[in-house]
Amino acid sequence: MNIAIEEVVLFEIEKTSKLAKMYSQREFDKRQVALTVDQWILIKVIEEYGPLTQRALAARVFRDPASVKRTLDLLESKELISRKPDDQDRRQHQVELRDRGISLIKELMPMISQHRKQSTAGFSATEKQELVRLLKRMQDNFLD
Amino acid sequence: MNIAIEEVVLFEIEKTSKLAKMYSQREFDKRQVALTVDQWILIKVIEEYGPLTQRALAARVFRDPASVKRTLDLLESKELISRKPDDQDRRQHQVELRDRGISLIKELMPMISQHRKQSTAGFSATEKQELVRLLKRMQDNFLD
DNA sequence: CGATATTCATTGATACATCAACGTTTATCC
DNA sequence: GGATAAACGTTGATGTATCAATGAATATCG
């Protein structure tokens, strides 16, 4: 049974992605942080690029707007973010961080930075760049 | 706002993984194949390694046994697989392909092979190997 | 200016992901 | 051998992913 390298590549990408997410989630749980990794990513992106619309937010994190909407509902109930209807265009809502969101991010950033470093521990600068370069080329192959 | 390369790497892995799955799913839908990508992966693994227990199957595809169980329920209702209680150990079930599963795989393999090749189109043999090597090293970084 | 088309957020339906808890069956240990 | 522990599959709860459809607001076009 000959297994094509192409198959291995796709499998390893999927596996790496899952492992990274599981690793982060365990860290959150260990520290009693009542957040999922996807929720964390949203509030971090809102901090960096907000206020922004739900659609713009979804595009930035590469998720479906319907899915992002539901996650925002949860973050709103935790009082970490708020949504305000836009005055110029009342179809869209501006999403922004609330105080509790801001302080939560400040609190968690050290752990997050540590996790990011851990992901490429032992990699040279060249290897990190090469990995990103190859991944982007693969992405292009899927955009037809 | 300086964005660490570690952050980019993790993001690109996630993005590549999502794109690959979306690309495959669109192909399935286009051809009216009534399967999700995850369902396809399960029956393909059962074909290659079956019969096997649900737990062994879950470990092979790197998924949660509870999740695999539910997907197997769907595949069973489509009459693509069957489950038999093991005589030696009645806690576990042996999962195997049924005739319809076998012929479905035969029918879809050309498309799948094409998709796998597409993923690494333009890659040299060295680049493919390098990508897999870097991914595996990253996985090791998460196994503590 | 008024009909038509598009955009945004939302909701419903279906599927997958993870963990915890549970019943049944099998292993282990005193 | 009988109590205790562990393994397998299952179910429930919660969160995320995708597509299709809907309502309200805005753009566009004749």
Image (cartoon, coloured by chain):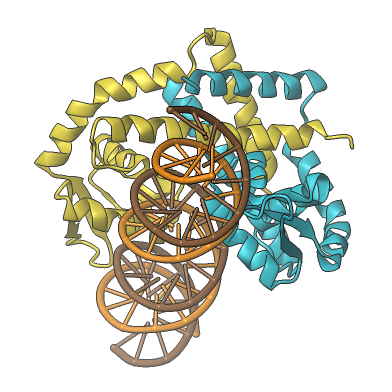
Chain colours: A cyan, B yellow, C orange, D brown
Q: Above or below — where is C9 with respect to B141?
A: below
Q: Position of residue A87 (x, y in %)?
A: 74, 55
Q: Quadrant of the N terminus of chain A?
A: top left
**Residue at x 12%, y 40% (from the top left corner):** B100
Q: Position of residue B88 (x, y in %)?
A: 21, 61
Q: Between residues B52 and A140, which one lies in front from this camera angle?
A: A140
Q: Position of residue A48 (x, y in %)?
A: 82, 46
Q: Between residues B86 and B113, which one lies in front from this camera angle?
A: B113
**Residue A49 quadrant:** top right
**Residue B141 quadrant:** top right
**Residue at x 57%, y 10% (from the top left corner):** B126
Along the horizontal axis of the image, is B17 left or right of C24? Answer: right
Along the horizontal axis of the image, is A68 left or right of B24? Answer: right
Q: Above or below — where is B53 with respect to D11?
A: above
**Residue at x 77%, y 42% (from the top left corner):** A116
Q: Above or below — where is D29 with respect to A117?
A: above
Q: Between residues A43 and A29, which one lies in front from this camera angle?
A: A43
Q: Position of residue A73 (x, y in %)?
A: 62, 65
Along the horizontal axis of the image, is D9 left or right of D16? Answer: left
Q: Residue furthest left?
A: B99
Residue B24 visible somewhere in the drawing: yes
Along the horizontal axis of the image, is B130 left or right of C15? Answer: right
Q: Between residues A124 and C27, which one lies in front from this camera angle?
A: A124
**Residue at x 67%, y 23% (from the top left corner):** A131
**Residue D8 quadrant:** bottom left
Mark count? 0
Residue A2 visible somewhere in the drawing: no
